[in-house]
Image (cartoon, rainbow, N blue to C red):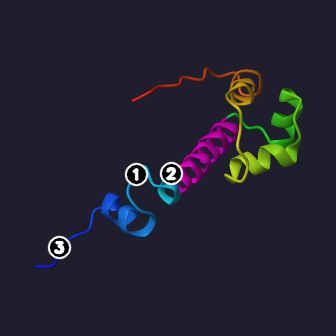
Amino acid sequence: MNKITTFEEHLDKQYGKKGTTERDSFDAESMAFRLGVLLKEARTKAHLTQEELALRTSTKKSYISRIESGKSEIQLSTLYKIIRQGLGKELIVAIK
């Protein structure tokens, strides 16, 4: 019977164990991508275009686009502004 590799084992093999430079870089990029997906879903549910969200938050459409595609890092204060002012939602942050 073949042993099934867990996703964590795959990441360890591909990027190294948690705490290594390469793995930490991958995890950070992965988080940026996931955050972008969540933001895009929330914007779409609010029936807003990227341009409309940018206008509400005094940012640029290109910046919203970069965030949604995971290609731009975002400060917590800016994320808070986009969620609160732009989407009229509440941002909840947790530490595990």
Q: Where is residue 51 in the image (x, y as percent from the top left)?
A: 87, 41
Q: Residue furthest front?
A: 20
**Magenta stretch mostly in which secondary structure?**
helix
Residue identifier under label 3 = 3
Closest to the observer, 38 or 10:
10
The answer to whether 47 is drawn above or below residue 29 in the figure is: above
Label 1, on which residue?
18
Residue lying at 89% horizontally and 29% vertically, measured from the top left? 58
What amino acid type is highlighted by mark number 3?
Answer: Lys
Label 1 sits on what residue type? Lys
- List the residue tagged with mark 2: 24
Magenta highlight range: 24-45
User: Which quarter of the image is occupied by the N terminus?
Assistant: bottom left
| CA separation in Å, label 1 and label 3 | 22 Å
- Look at the image and tell me in which quarter the C terminus lies: top left
Camera-near label (1 vs 3) is 1
In this picture, is 67 found above or below 89? below
Q: State which tag comes first along the sequence, 1 or 2.
A: 1
